[in-house]
Amino acid sequence: MLKLPSHIAVLTSGGDAPGMNAAIRAVVRSAVYYGKKVSGVYNGYEGLIDGTFEELDSRSVKYILNHGGTFLKSARSQRFRTPEGRKQAHENLVKAGIDALIVIGGDGSFTGAKIFSEEFDFQVIGVPGTIDNDLYGTDFTIGFDTATNTAIECIDKIRDTASSHDRLFLVEVMGRDSGFIALRSAIAAGALEVIMPENSITYDQLYQAIERAGQNKKFSNIIVVAEGNKLGNIFEIADHLKAKFPHLDIKVTILGHLQRGGSPTVFDRVLASKLGVAAVEGLLIGRNKVMAGVMHNQVIYTPFEEAITRRAYINPELIRINKILTI
Ligand code: ATP
């Protein structure tokens, strides 16, 4: 007989992402809507182990929808990787009368959630919150759209100076082992090339792209570099290009943590709201060990096992479009 939860806890874990606050708000408000108790856990899995819980109501989450970061704070927890840490976390949850958990985070957080859920037969649902967009089972993760918009805003500014001085800029964007941010930014910014893990571009191809741009009288250029690309470190890439094209003025910019901050876009706020509600409604129909996601505009629930082991592939159509437009 299925036992439905009466008291839901929510936490944010791993790297922070803009829109996490909107997701927390949606979890809290939908839990209240369905007559359930809801508690926030501070500092991710660390807070589960330390028992830093606070009961929340619909007023507790006012004015957070538009704020970046996560008011519950996020953390990476070594202790949660140990059986002793997870046992302590479970004891604290039981003591607080909490019988279900919503984890907002990335694949690492869902790996921890899956292990915990199996060990203690505890009901857990995940919400994809990471700027990297690297999770299987959702077209978009919360924070990706905002991070990409931030990258574009910066690249547009870089382009102003690039075109005033006929410079070639290499701009590094985040994304860990995937090129979602890089490819989308490259298309939206009209970059000459994108160097990302998925396209295995060679130096010869890069040289050809730069030579072709010169022949087409395109003297100011942007190349977007994903941090996880396989060609190399952005400074090494710049050195190679300087050696090949000594007459070019080549600059490097690393956008870094700028991409994690800022007010979430409308897209991320709506996505976070949808997924927060979907997580609570999923718990109430007995879903467990799954991640709530949106694919083709439909809410779907993907088992943690699949979400963390299967790879989220970049749409090849976007790679094709980018190739055509960089001519
Ligand atoms: P992001 O994609 O933004 O980095 P993430 O959720 O992948 O987010 P991680 O640092 O990989 O971030 O994982 C977050 C936390 O999940 C870890 O600090 C750890 O507490 C927990 N976790 C990850 N893997 C495991 C595991 N194998 N066993 C138990 N807990 C884990």
Image (cartoon, grey):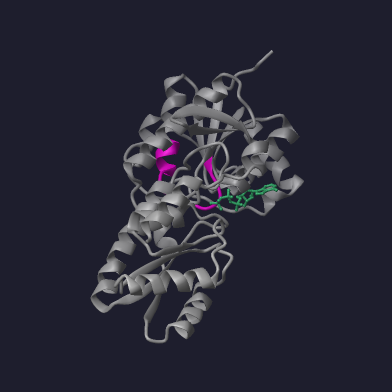
- Reply above or below: 159 against 318: below
Q: How many marks?
A: 0
Q: Tell me if 111 is positioned left or right of 34 in this view.
A: right
Q: Tell me if 107 is positioned left or right of 158 in this view.
A: right
Quadrant containing the C terminus is: bottom left
- Reply above or below: 71 against 24: below
Quadrant position of residue 33: top left
For the question of whether residue 25 can be seen, the reply is no
- Reply above or below: 13 against 123: below
For the question of whether residue 46 can be seen, the reply is yes
Q: Residue at x 61, y 39 (%)?
A: 307
Q: Residue furthest front?
A: 215
In percent of width and height, residue 83 lies at 76, 45
- Reply above or below: 227 against 263: below
Q: Tell me if 324 is positioned left or right of 285 in this view.
A: left
Quadrant containing the N terminus is: top right
Q: Which residues are magenta?
A: 11-25
